[in-house]
Image (cartoon, rainbow, N blue to C red):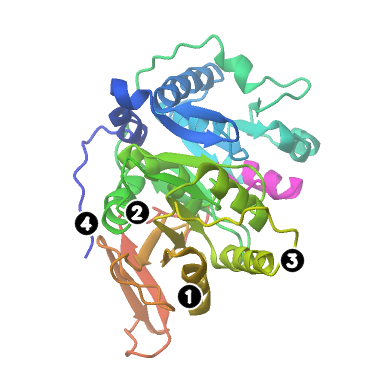
Amino acid sequence: MTLQIDLPKQFNVADYYILPNQTPERARKPYMYCGDHQLTYGELHAKANQVGHALRKLGVEPEHRVMLLMLESLAFPVCFWGAIRIGAISVPVNTMLSSKDYLYYLNDSRARVLIVDAALWPQIEPIQKQLPHLRHIVIANGSAAGRPSLDELLKSESTALDTVLMSPDDQAFWLYTSGSTGDPKAAVHLHHDMVHVTETFTRQVLGLNENDLTFSAAKFFFAYGLGNSLYFPMTVGARAVVQPARPAPDVIFDVLDKFKPTVFYGVPTLYNAMLNLYEAWLEGKNSPPSKLPTLKHLRFSVSAGEALPPDLFRRWKQHFGTPILDGIGSTEMLHIFISNRLDSIKPGSSGTVVPGYEVRLVDEFDKDVMDGEVGALLAKGDSGAAYYWNKHE
């Protein structure tokens, strides 16, 4: 069954996640690690406020889009929440695409401001004169000739900001689909959508707590990664690790070994690659490290994106001793809505419906199929996208 969460008529989701973490003790606690750097909950609040002020000076108003073409870094959550705090709409996009793709994203979204990582500026520079709606480009994590840097814009801004109160049903952020069936579509998510996910999946299935340290191989621009790294930890005052490199298995093992997270989020393709590398190391192949990773620090791992084969579950648990919770989610539904549970895991199955959601399996005539028959999966829940921007269906 669906879940009704009562929220005030005037509401901003940034406050929902940021303000409960501003007690003196929690504000000093690290929220996120990236390499040798960290961001505390208090710093997140202060810097997000500075971003809000800076965006206002660039002419950003409520409902304007702010596109984030940013690698994993401590600057991402600051910019994501800073835009939302002033009523603007954050639009994180895939960092592994071409100039042509970004031309489409920027013109389709009509973003007023683009915050782009210095490392990705070469993808934007050739198209900057083809963007009639874009007013400003800001460079994060570095510099580019002729463009203001994020650090420059923030250094003189106040760390105090009055949040713009919206409606729970106002737009908060967009996530673009992969475009596997045509042009990518922007799934429009509202201020209440993340709340629904955290009150259902995060609390009732994962059971995260403030002592957890999480690491997601999926990036912020994926709905899966956005929950895993950005707002799931904030729900309980936990910590997260992010890393900007592509998720090669050796890179992932390095992060797991260095930070020793308690919860890891991956996808079946990555789990398979990691297991293949680990098993090669056991045989003395592929230049094994002097000390093989044990991953004893993990409480459990999570998988989504495609079905997790039973053999991957078995091999992972055999080598590392902890389970993988497989589930089904989507960009449109924002995160996982069918999942295994720690006390009820069936390898080869995606599990059962997460509390707060309803699902049906139907045929081409929208009739429920019989047990054992193939059908189309329909999902209903309050985290579902309101619609596709400019793509009515």
Residue type beneath disc 2: Ser
In the rendered view, would you say 43 is above or below 246?
Answer: above
For mark 3, give the secondary structure: loop
State yes or no: discs 2 and 1 in contact (Cβ < 8 Å). no
The one nearer the camera, 71 or 381, is 71
Find the distance from the CA under tag 4 to the CA under tag 1.
Answer: 34 Å
Residue 298: x %, y % from top left: 44, 54
Q: Amino acid at mark 4?
A: Leu
Residue that lies at the very extreme toward the top in this rendered image: 156
At x 52%, y 67%, the residue is: 319
Residue at numbered disc 2: 383
- Residue type highlighted by circle 1: Arg
Locate residue 257, reporting x and y percent: 56, 48
Q: Residue at x 22, y 36 (%)?
A: 9
Residue 96 inside the magenta-drawn segment: yes
Secondary structure beneath label 1 = helix
Q: Earlier in the sequence, mark 1 or mark 3?
A: 3
* Residue position for label 3: 285
